[in-house]
Image: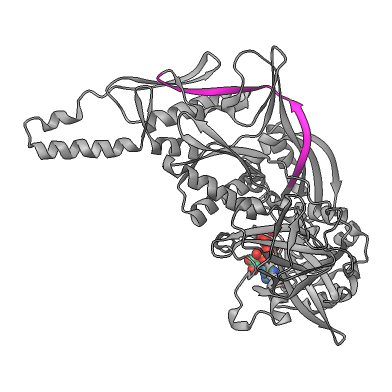
Amino acid sequence: TDQSLIRNFCIIAHIDHGKSTVADRILQLSGIVPEREMRDRFLDRMDIEQERGITIKSQAVRVPWIFDGTEYTLGMIDTPGHVDFTYEVSRALAACEGAVLLVDATQGIEAQTLSNLYMAIDHDLTIIPVLNKIDLPSAEPDKHADEIANLIGCKPGEVLRVSGKTGEGIKDLLDQIVLEVPAPHGDPKAPARALIFDSVYDSYRGIVTYIRMEDGELKAREKVHMMGIGMTHEPIEIGVISPDMTPTKALGAGEVGYIITGAKDVSQSKVGDTVTSAIRPADQPLPGYKDPQPMVYSGLFPVDNAQFPDLRDALDKLKLNDAALVYEPETSVALGFGFRCGFLGLLHMEIVSERLSREFGLDLISTAPNVTYRVTSEDGTEHQVTNPSEFPDGKIKKIVEPMVSAEIITPKEFIGAVMDLCQEHRGEMGAMEYLSAERVQMHYRIPLAEIVFNFFDELKSRTRGYASLNYEEDGEQAADLVKVDILIQGEKIDAFSAVVHRDKSYSYGVMMTKKLSKLIPRQQFEIPIQAAIGSRIIARETIRALRKDVLAKCYGGDITRKRKLLEKQKAGKKRMKMLGHVEVPQEAFIAALSTN
Ligand code: GTP
């Protein structure tokens, strides 16, 4: 394809402002998806995305568009809106020259509108501002067009108005993309260079690698070289997605497409790597991506420990399609072999465990999530703690926790409510700006641990759903944190240890001991359940001893009944963990960890 006829753009917006719906209308209008095959949010290809109504993965698709009698090739990428998937958005931006900034005409600018816009500007993309949902009676396009014009410095009249529902304005939007988004400007004659921006594991075809061509050309059946990992492959197929995988003879400068090499070993493809021709290789790789920094960590353990190798394999494959996921093996006294995994947030964590169970059939337990702490012991040694069970024993000189800078956008009547909430979560207020007469943007510096857990839900409920939140890393700060251990019959249960603020340590201890005392069945002896900070016990519950033996009622009864009972007990025991002398059912761990 002639580069001057290519336009690569992504659609960015705050969550629910209608990216996927507008993408649907574009697919329909361009004619690549026939009417009878059209379904809502066509590019949300995963079941989880359809069920939850949110986009998790960026999806690239090629659509033809005729403008002024000439056929153009549009490379469109629909991106996720939730803050946990910012890394997906940033990689998509790097594959484009333009961004359609979509704003819901009933809502106006929200927190992720701003963060996505700033990211697009950082990537030097041409921004096309668009108001969506103008079909709704509550839409206020004039008001929000002013807001957007102020923000990006255009004229209010230059903000397009569309409806993803009725299709109004979509044709103009596509024409505008052709007119305004610059054509790619790679060197078509140079040695080939393509950036890997995503990949996925297909059980039949092996690894499918998604690439954006910068320079030169890659031909089907011509050997390719992955510069970062230093591997050479013969592609079985190269092609474009339009709307499904469509093989082509070659991919030229500026095009977005895929390569299948037949490789099944997941280490053979790495997001951010550069693909070049093995016959005429480039000297320098493309810049690639910054590795994402996990925000929260949690342990993932197979319920059945025999599934540990399957879990490893599943994580390796999932990682191909989720470059933000990090993991390393860990062992727990209580839960056996598993992995300590790093995620970009709780939604990300939830999606990963759901995908592991759906796509790989794994039954998993996850431990309570935590952030990373830097702990300095009295003797000066420093520990990076991503797992509370690694928290050093003995005297602690200093603990440092990660901080974020948070942006909250809210109608002005909720300013007080937001201030209260942030204060309760140890937030420090910064500047406050009016976006319009009614809406303000508030800046805060807050510990990450305070924001990742319930903060967003509380914010929504205290502002009747009107406030939006975005945050990014912002250094570290010393804090008064302690590790709370949970002991069953004097034995420390690593999976339940937590690092919490001193003010909340007592309530954590009481909550966990109460919960466990209800979950662990009574046994032949008394079982103390304690919460402790170091050697100091802060909470205690006791499970009283059972008085009678289970078999007592069978004495004198028939022998087969007794044997059956014993066998049933044995089967039950398989799912029991022995902690010292105490038998704890697997379900007790799951239940105790689930509502944290
Ligand atoms: P994420 O990908 O999860 O960030 O969401 P999104 O931005 O892709 O939003 P999506 O397209 O899923 O739309 C969110 C909701 O708004 C859905 O219920 C859509 O049906 C609705 N919607 C989208 N565009 C329009 C529109 O133009 N008019 C009306 N009335 N509803 C719309």
**Dividing the image into 4 quarters, which one contains the N terminus?**
bottom right
Query: Which one is nearer the viewer's eye here, 508 or 550?
Result: 550
> Which percent across, then down, holds residue 484?
55, 23
Please name the residue shown 86% across and 87% down the image. 69
Instruction: Give yes or no for residue 311 being in the magenta stretch.
Output: no
Residue 483 lies within the magenta run = yes
Instruction: Give how far across and how far down residue 51 sits, in percent.
Output: 55, 62
- Seen from the viewer's position, the closer of residues 343 and 457 is 343
Q: Quadrant of residue 551?
A: top left
- Which x, y percent locates residue 432? 84, 42
Q: Is residue 359 left or right of residue 240?
A: left
Residues rendered magenta in the picture: 470-489
Instruction: Decide if residue 443 is on the left or right side of residue 233.
Output: right
- Residue visible at 62% across and 46% down in the picture: 457
Depth check: 458 or 573 in front?
Answer: 573
Residue 319 against residue 68 in the figure, above or below? above
> Where's ligand 1: which quadrant?
bottom right
Name the residue located 27 percent from the left edge and 23 percent from the top edge: 524
Among the 4 quarters of the image, the one containing residue 245: bottom right
Q: Position of residue 527 (x, y in %)?
A: 36, 21
Image check: 576 left or right of 25? left
